[in-house]
Amino acid sequence: MTVTGELKCAHCDFKIGDSCAAVLKTEKALYFLKGKKAKAFAKENPKAKKAEAVGQAKKVGENYELKVTSIALKE
Protein backbone atom coordinates (compact mmCIF):
# COMPACT_ATOMS: atom_id res chain seq x y z
CA MET A 1 0.00 0.00 0.00
CA THR A 2 1.19 3.53 -0.81
CA VAL A 3 0.18 6.40 1.48
CA THR A 4 0.83 10.09 0.83
CA GLY A 5 0.29 12.73 3.49
CA GLU A 6 1.75 15.26 5.89
CA LEU A 7 4.17 14.03 8.56
CA LYS A 8 2.92 14.86 12.06
CA CYS A 9 3.49 13.79 15.67
CA ALA A 10 0.58 11.81 17.12
CA HIS A 11 1.27 13.06 20.66
CA CYS A 12 2.16 16.71 19.98
CA ASP A 13 -0.32 17.43 17.16
CA PHE A 14 -3.26 15.14 17.99
CA LYS A 15 -2.85 14.40 21.74
CA ILE A 16 -2.77 10.64 21.03
CA GLY A 17 -0.55 8.49 23.25
CA ASP A 18 1.95 9.31 25.97
CA SER A 19 5.00 9.92 23.77
CA CYS A 20 5.91 11.18 20.31
CA ALA A 21 5.05 8.93 17.37
CA ALA A 22 5.36 9.67 13.66
CA VAL A 23 2.12 9.61 11.67
CA LEU A 24 1.14 10.45 8.12
CA LYS A 25 -2.05 12.48 8.09
CA THR A 26 -4.20 11.91 5.02
CA GLU A 27 -7.65 13.32 4.25
CA LYS A 28 -9.32 10.20 5.64
CA ALA A 29 -7.08 8.73 8.36
CA LEU A 30 -3.90 8.78 10.41
CA TYR A 31 -1.23 6.21 9.55
CA PHE A 32 1.13 5.44 12.44
CA LEU A 33 4.54 4.77 10.88
CA LYS A 34 6.41 1.71 12.15
CA GLY A 35 9.93 0.44 11.44
CA LYS A 36 13.52 1.68 11.29
CA LYS A 37 13.10 3.48 7.96
CA ALA A 38 10.11 5.42 9.27
CA LYS A 39 11.92 6.38 12.47
CA ALA A 40 15.02 7.61 10.59
CA PHE A 41 12.91 9.56 8.07
CA ALA A 42 10.85 11.24 10.81
CA LYS A 43 14.02 12.25 12.64
CA GLU A 44 15.52 13.83 9.49
CA ASN A 45 12.24 15.41 8.25
CA PRO A 46 10.14 16.12 11.36
CA LYS A 47 7.59 18.40 9.66
CA ALA A 48 7.55 17.17 6.05
CA LYS A 49 4.61 18.76 4.25
CA LYS A 50 4.25 15.87 1.81
CA ALA A 51 5.74 12.40 2.20
CA GLU A 52 5.01 9.11 0.49
CA ALA A 53 5.35 5.84 2.38
CA VAL A 54 5.04 2.30 1.05
CA GLY A 55 4.35 -0.66 3.29
CA GLN A 56 1.81 -2.98 4.80
CA ALA A 57 -1.11 -1.37 6.64
CA LYS A 58 -3.52 -2.75 9.21
CA LYS A 59 -6.47 -1.05 10.85
CA VAL A 60 -6.13 -0.35 14.57
CA GLY A 61 -9.23 1.32 15.99
CA GLU A 62 -10.04 4.41 13.91
CA ASN A 63 -6.48 4.67 12.52
CA TYR A 64 -3.91 2.49 10.79
CA GLU A 65 -0.41 1.16 11.45
CA LEU A 66 1.88 1.17 8.43
CA LYS A 67 4.97 -1.06 8.52
CA VAL A 68 7.17 1.04 6.24
CA THR A 69 9.31 -0.58 3.54
CA SER A 70 10.22 2.76 1.89
CA ILE A 71 9.51 6.42 2.55
CA ALA A 72 10.52 9.64 0.78
CA LEU A 73 9.67 13.31 0.41
CA LYS A 74 7.13 13.96 -2.33
CA GLU A 75 7.02 17.08 -4.52
Image: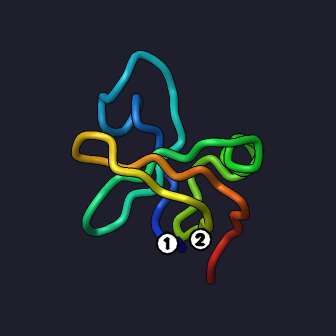
As drawn, the label of residue 4 is 1
As drawn, the label of residue 22 is none
Picture quadrant where residue 40 is located = top right
Mark 2 residue type:
Glu
Which residue appears farthest toward the top when viewing the image?
A: 18
**Colour scheme of the rendered structure:** rainbow
Tell me the residue that label 2 is attached to: 52
Picture quadrant where residue 74 is located = bottom right
Mark 1 residue type:
Thr
Q: Position of residue 75 (x, y in %)?
A: 62, 83
Q: Are marks 1 and 2 in contact (CB under 8 Å)?
A: yes
Q: Position of residue 62 (x, y in %)?
A: 22, 46
Residue at screen point 69% across, 64% down: 71
Nearer to us in this view, 10 or 13: 10
Q: Position of residue 53 (x, y in %)?
A: 60, 65
Residue at screen point 34% across, 50% down: 59
Q: Which type of secondary structure does the marked residue at label 1 adopt?
A: strand
For this view, does 20 lie left or right of residue 55?
Answer: left
How far separated are the C-alphas under marks 1 and 2?
A: 4 Å
Nearer to us in this view, 1 or 70: 1
Q: Residues within 10 Å of mark 2 (few under 14, many from 20)?
A: some
Relative vertical location of residue 44 with respect to residue 55 in this rendering, above or below: above
Relative vertical location of residue 69 with respect to residue 61 in this rendering, above or below: below
